[in-house]
Amino acid sequence: ALEKIDYVAEINRLKKEKNAVILAHYYQTADIQDVADYIGDSLGLSQQAAKTKADMIVFAGVRFMAETAKILSPDKKVVLPDINAGCSLEESAPADVFSAFKAKHPDAVVISYVNCSAELKTLTDIVCTSTNAVKIVESVPKDKQIIFAPDKNLGDYLNRKTGRDMILWDGACMVHEAFSADMITELKAKHPDAEIIAHPESEKPVLDVASYIGSTTGLLKYTMSSPSKEFIVATESGILHQMKKASPDKKFHVAPTVKNGYACQACQDCPHMKLNTMEKLYYCLKNEKPEITLPEDVIRDAKAPIDRMLEISA
Ligand code: 13P
Ligand code: SF4
């Protein structure tokens, strides 16, 4: 007979037995967030990965995040529940194409959003996340040209915010690109007391209607500190779990999305983030695979721009 596995109990048992730590991004499903040892944004997760004493890091997130953990803790085993969990931003910037582009701007400083491949990081001067992006951009002398890759929406937002004129790579997040400013405005008309808040990966028309713009941690903290009782949230739906937990008396709506001109019900869910399930998390912890491995030279060259980021944002 098929025996039913109690994933929560088994995951907790295996975690102790193997001295493993589960790091989960806010975009994971609620059940995964609830068994994680640490839940956070890209910056928080990389800081945790750099300092953990665990023997194995189980990364409940996407591949670029697990790669960053591996780069920061190369002696630890890093596993990812589904090795196909990619990212549309990562896909938009193949290292060879970017390298040719970079060669045309030999004097430019390259800042890359952490949402990119390890190979792209080897071509980068400073990595950033949405939490520290303004600070990182401002750390570069004003007379220096900057190439910002791969998120054009975040880059455009940073150009407006810092008054810079960075050269932007043409990449976007498939989730944040789907948010519709018109539909958000319609929803706001139905809920006039709701405050609109957005992640800077969103397009300008969405950011223009938002009263607060920030990273996932920024958005979560904002919902806790704002006197508003209702929010329309323009970022991936997974974040609502912690928002509701932190403020059970407040109401949250995920911002509406469109695809090919039609309202889309599933576009607020990142198909990459949502490849991870409790079942895959359990087998990944049990079998210690799929494992993230990277060539030594990639680890070395990708670590320098991440270390620079961690120093600047410390
Ligand atoms: P942060 O959690 O760092 O804001 O990043 C958002 C994101 O899109 C991660 O894939
Ligand atoms: Fe990439 Fe967007 Fe998914 Fe984050 S939400 S992993 S940026 S596609």
Image (cartoon, rainbow, N blue to C red):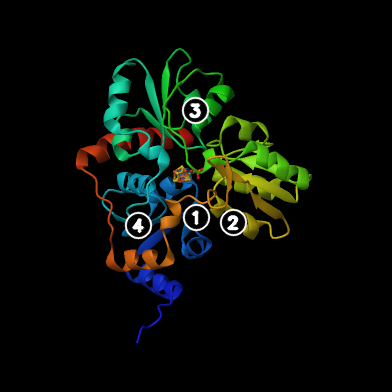
Crowd tier of the residue under label 4, counting other residues whose Cα lies within 10 Å: few below 14, some 14–19, many 20 or above:
many
Which corner quadrant of the image does residue 89 belong to?
top left
Crowd tier of the residue under label 2, counting other residues whose Cα lies within 10 Å: few below 14, some 14–19, many 20 or above:
some
The answer to which of 156 and 48 lies nearer the viewer is 156
Q: In the rendering, at what x and y percent does residue 68 appear?
A: 35, 44
The answer to which of 55 and 205 lies nearer the viewer is 205
Q: Which residue carries the number 2 mark?
A: 242
- C-alpha span from label 3 to label 4: 29 Å
Type of the residue with mark 1: Ile
Q: In the rendering, which numbered label is found on residue 4?
A: none
Which mark sits nearer the N-terminus, 4 or 2? 4
Crowd tier of the residue under label 3, counting other residues whose Cα lies within 10 Å: few below 14, some 14–19, many 20 or above:
many
Where 166 falls versus 181 (above or below)?
A: above
Q: In the rendering, at what x and y percent does residue 105 appear?
A: 34, 16
Which mark sits nearer the N-terminus, 4 or 1? 1
Front disc: 4 or 1: 4
The answer to which of 303 and 208 lies nearer the viewer is 208
Front disc: 3 or 1: 3
Which mark sits nearer the N-terminus, 3 or 4? 4
Type of the residue with mark 3: Gly
Which mark sits nearer the N-terminus, 3 or 2? 3
Which corner quadrant of the image does residue 274 belong to?
bottom left
Q: Which residue carries the number 3 mark?
A: 155
Type of the residue with mark 2: Gln
The structure residue drawn at horizontal position 50% and vertical position 35%, both measured from the top left corner, is 132
- C-alpha span from label 3 to label 2: 27 Å
Q: Which residue carries the number 4 mark?
A: 82
| Labels 2 & 1 near each other (Cβ < 8 A) | yes
- C-alpha span from label 3 to label 1: 26 Å
- C-alpha span from label 2 to label 1: 9 Å
Looking at the image, which residue sits at the far right? 192
